[in-house]
Image: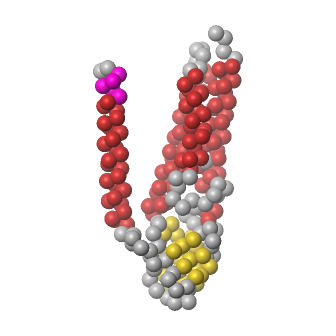
Amino acid sequence: MSAPKRWLLLSILFLLAGGAGLLYASVVQKLTNEPLEPNLVVDINRKEVRTQTQVAHLVGSPFYYPRDRYSAVLQTPGNFQASGFKVQSNGNVIEIERSALVQFSAHTIVALIWITALSVAAAALKTLIAESKPDPALLTWASIALLALPALRQTMVGAPAIGIYIDFYGFLCCEVIVVVSLLALTVKWLARKD
């Protein structure tokens, strides 16, 4: 099969995969049955929860995102819903945690970050072991991966700033892996003999 036919086939497969992903996302949104207009607004950054008539302060920490939990005491009891959160109310006390879909999304992004970092490390290791000089495209790819990881981390739904628990095992160590791999590739490139 010629190269243009392969690229055409790959692009068609990627379009089909993207369409399947959009279809899956719409089905999951309908299955989670989240309201279009939540009657409870959770503001993690300001540590408060708001309804139409009252404001209550949240007790909890975003450090354990996406498994962080919060509680608040409201003046008026009721049943509440918030988009992206699972809310349980026991009288005036409500307990709030991220929805299962948000947790799944965050862990999927961490898995993608690890896959990217390990693929850069594997390519760097193979290049270091090989007797040939490294390909300049590999240096470009590793540099782009280094800059893409923070952007990928920011796609986590409602994630706090860098420095939370998930960053220590899923982002910062991957950044170090990519930096060390890029440094090793650069040293091999500079030490080459043409």
81 left or right, relative to 187: left
Q: Residue furthest bottom?
A: 76
The quadrant in which the C terminus is found is top right
| Rendering coords of residue 86 (x, y %) | 47, 71
99 left or right, relative to 47: left
At x 47%, y 66%, the residue is 84
**For this rendering, which residue is in front, 111 or 40?**
40
The quadrant in which the N terminus is found is top left
Query: Residue 144 lies in what quarter of the image?
Result: top right
Magenta region includes residue 172? no
**For this rendering, which residue is in front, 144 or 17?**
144
| Rendering coords of residue 95 (x, y %) | 53, 77
Predominant secondary structure, magenta span = helix
At x 48%, y 51%, the residue is 108
Check the image and report above or below for 38 versus 20.
below
At x 35%, y 22%, the residue is 3
Query: Residue 34 lies in what quarter of the image?
Result: bottom left
Q: Is residue 71 visible?
A: no
Magenta region includes residue 4? yes
Q: How many marks?
A: 0
Q: Is residue 43 visible?
A: yes
Check the image and report above or below for 84 versus 143.
below
At x 45%, y 78%, the residue is 39
Check the image and report above or below for 53 versus 154.
below
| Rendering coords of residue 79 (x, y %) | 44, 83
**Magenta range:** 3-7
Q: How is the image coloured?
A: secondary structure
47 left or right, relative to 52: right
| Rendering coords of residue 110 (x, y %) | 53, 49
